[in-house]
Structures are given as C-alpha cells and as structure tokens.
Image (spheres, helix red, strand yellow):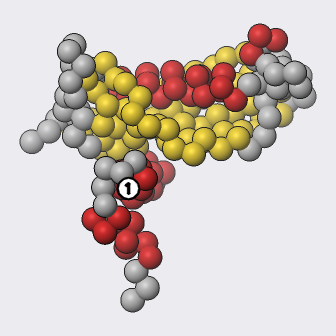
Amino acid sequence: MRKQKPVKESFVIMTELVLPNDTNTLNNLMGGRMMHLMDIAAAISAQKHSNRIVVTASVDNVSFRDSIALGNVVTLQAQVTRSFNSSMEVHIDVWAEDIPSGTKMKTNEAFFTFVAVDQSGRPIDVPEAVAETEEEIRLYDGALRRRQLRLVLGGRMQPQDANELKALFDME
C-alpha cells in the first residue's frame, strides 16, 4: 500500500513584483515569464508532495484572462490535486494585485503534471494524495478525466480506453 499524504501539505504561495524587465512593449507581464513563474510554483508543490526531484511532464491550457501590469504584485497558489504512480497533477491560480488602487483579480489558472524521478532520472512512486476539503475533493475527482484527456491528446491512450471521458458523454 502506498503512503498517503494530504494535498494541503503541498500548498505553495509564491509572490513576485512585476518589474520592467518582465514586461512586453505594452508594459504587461510577458506570457512566457508568467508560465515560468507558474512552472516554479507548481514544481515546488509537487516536490513538497513527493519529497523527490520532479520534472514537468505537461501543461494544460494556460488561460490568460486579464493582463498583469508593470508594478502589480503577482501571487501564485499551487497545490497537488491528485497523484498517480509517479505523476502528480498540480493546480495553479494566479492573482494580480494593484496595491495603490486596492484591486485584486484572478488572472490565470492552469494544471501542470509532474513526474517524480530518482537520482538517475527514472520515475519513482509518489504518495497517494488525500483530498479533504470540498474544493480539494472537486479537483481530485476531475483529475482522472483531465489525465485521460492528456494521455489521449498525447497519443499515449486510445480514446476508446478513456472510460472517465466517455462517461462525460454517455447520454443514456
């Protein structure tokens, strides 16, 4: 039986200030810089869950809802949603805060997948993720569908074998 670990133990908060070197010609945070920050926060979360070295395996649909301006404070919140054998799905929320105006808005959200590896780079088992709160359970329950979609899109699973996805479209 695999070791179990509450997902709350993987929770990470990372805060950054948007400086001129981080921005595009419109003085907004560059998308690539945002993805870099998201990857770091998510990797830390996966490492906290697995207590192992982790590598990024995939990134799902990073949505850029609103731009983040020069001088904004960016807060990233990451937490493992579910673990499989050696892989972990991590959910990331990004918030931008304009401190002088007192406004804060959610600007980005994504799911990253990490694989825990040993010193030789081979995949290694990770603890089972235990969801406790309503939100943790909601994300945990959807993780298998998201994983199957990733595998189908990546050519590593046949669509007819994706039972969790097929159940979404079962019209009986």
Q: Residue furthest front?
A: 155
Residue at image x 56%, y 41%? 110
Q: Amino acid at mark 1?
A: Val
Residue 39 visible from this viewpoint: yes
Q: Is residue 9 left or right of residue 62?
A: left
Image coordinates of residue 52 in percent, x first then y, are: 28, 20
Numbered-mark total = 1
Residue at image x 30%, y 37%? 87
Q: Nearer the viewer, residue 53 or 97?
A: 53
Which quadrant of the rendered structure holds the N terminus?
top left
Q: Is residue 78 left or right of residue 66?
A: left
Q: Is residue 126 left or right of residue 43?
A: left
In the image, residue 159 above or below residue 47 = below
In the image, residue 86 above or below residue 140 = above
Which quadrant of the rendered structure holds the C terminus?
bottom left
Residue occupied by mark 1: 152
